[in-house]
Amino acid sequence: MSFSSILGQDKTVKRLRALVETGRIPPAIIFHGAPGTGKFLAALEFAKALNCSHAAHMEKTPAPGPADEDLFSAPGPAAMPAPEPAPAQVSQDPSDSCGACLSCLQARSGAHPDIRVVDTAFQAALLDEAESANLKIDTMRELTRWAQQKPMLSPWKIFIVRDAEALMPQAQNALLKTLEEPPPGTLVILTVSRKTSLLSTILSRCCMIEFSLLPRMVLKAILEAQGAEPGQSEALAALGGGSLEKAAEAGAFLKRIQALHPEDTARVFKFSAGLPRDSHRAREEVKTLLDLLLARTRSAWRSAEGASKAKLAALLRRTLELRRMVNRNVSYALILETALLESERAGIKLEDLIEDGIKK
Ligand SMILES: [Zn+2]
């Protein structure tokens, strides 16, 4: 994997390659764009490219001991010492990672001593507590402490704060200290889909790199590479609206809907019972479902006439109102059930949300 694994972001990748090549790296960068547009993958590849040594790494294979040999076989050519492996061809492209040096191998296995991904899962392990939706001040204090230490074996010590919208304001203030006086050789990358969730003091200290929505064909190709069938990938790519995350969510909804019996009168409740337990994820899922519902209702409204047009207009207003309520402290399952039941009454069924996209 290298920058070539990032699809549909040609302009952004070109900019990142130029940064790697010149070596003039700002101490803090924000990767900004919609969810599921490749920001995190790009951050990992950028970190890998910055720390790549372009020197082939020879894995020392231990000499086979008696336990490794088949005791019943006669000694043959296999018992002879293996010849020295020929040095591997290592890419020397100065703007990308080689994938073969020690640093690249460590980065690929997620065990690079100088590249650290900071997210809610990492925080849970660090603070020895259940995973929370927010990144806390204690985690950013740890980051500040690590940032003061020299890189262990690479030119750069890199922190990737994934989904930085999860940073609480106090945590952002704690991070600000590192951004104001960046220790030499330290780079902080924040991936974020909502810039407004960051304090203006953070924004003003960071260089901004934008990620655009993915073209539909690119999304389709990625979905197929991940195992989606061609017929389905087309529809999911359309529903994804440029975001791999949204497309994957739509795929999961489709599976959940298909598992329900069409005549089951309780299917709306069964469907909403499948929302994730994590409230942050549940909220995002309900938002996506309501967006799908709004898109479906709008298209039905466009082709409707007379009384049914008025009915659909009322449904649109009501669904928009419910969509706004998602950001307040309310039961997501209740909002979803209300929206789905009201749509069914107006003639838009649960399966219409996704399956219409597939028929198109
Ligand atoms: Zn390398």
Image (cartoon, rainbow, N blue to C red):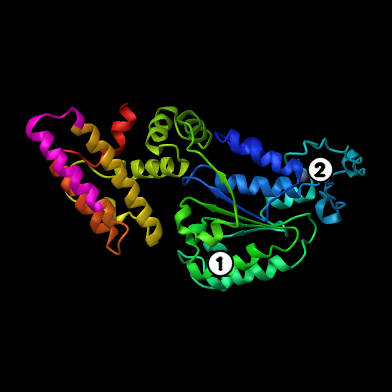
Label 1 secondary element: helix
Q: Main SS type for the magenta part?
A: helix
Q: Callout 2: helix, strand or loop?
A: loop
Which residue is located at x 35 percent, y 46 percent?
288
Q: Position of residue 24 (x, y in %)?
A: 74, 47
- In-image side of 77 versus 177 (left or right): right
Comes first in the chain, label 1 or label 2: 2
Q: Which residues are magenta?
A: 302-322
Give the x, y percent position of residue 214.
49, 35
* 180 magenta-colored: no
Front residue of 1 and 142: 142
Residues 84 and 131: in front is 131
At x 45%, y 64%, the residue is 133
Give the left or right position of residue 274, taking residue 17 as reference.
left
Quadrant where the C terminus is found in the figure: top left
Residue receiving disc 1? 123
Name the residue rendered at 66%, 54% in the picture.
110
The answer to whether residue 267 shows anywhere in this view is no
Residue 92: mark in rendering: none
Residue 350 against residue 166 in the figure, above or below: above
Under mark 2, the amino acid is His
Work out which quarter of the rendered image holds the N terminus and state it: top right
Q: Quadrant of ligand 1?
A: top right
Disc 1 crowd, CA 10 A, few/some/many (<14, 14-19, 20+) = many
> Residue 18 occupies which quadrant of the picture?
top right
* Residue 235 position in % (x across, y down): 38, 31
Question: What residue does disc 2 label?
Answer: 54
For label 2, being within 8 Å of ligand 1 is answered yes
Judge: label 1 CB < 8 Å from ligand 1.
no
Instruction: Give whichever of 28, 109 is nearer the camera.
Output: 28
User: Residue at 69% of width from left, 65% of height from top?
Assistant: 147
Residue type for callout 1: Gln
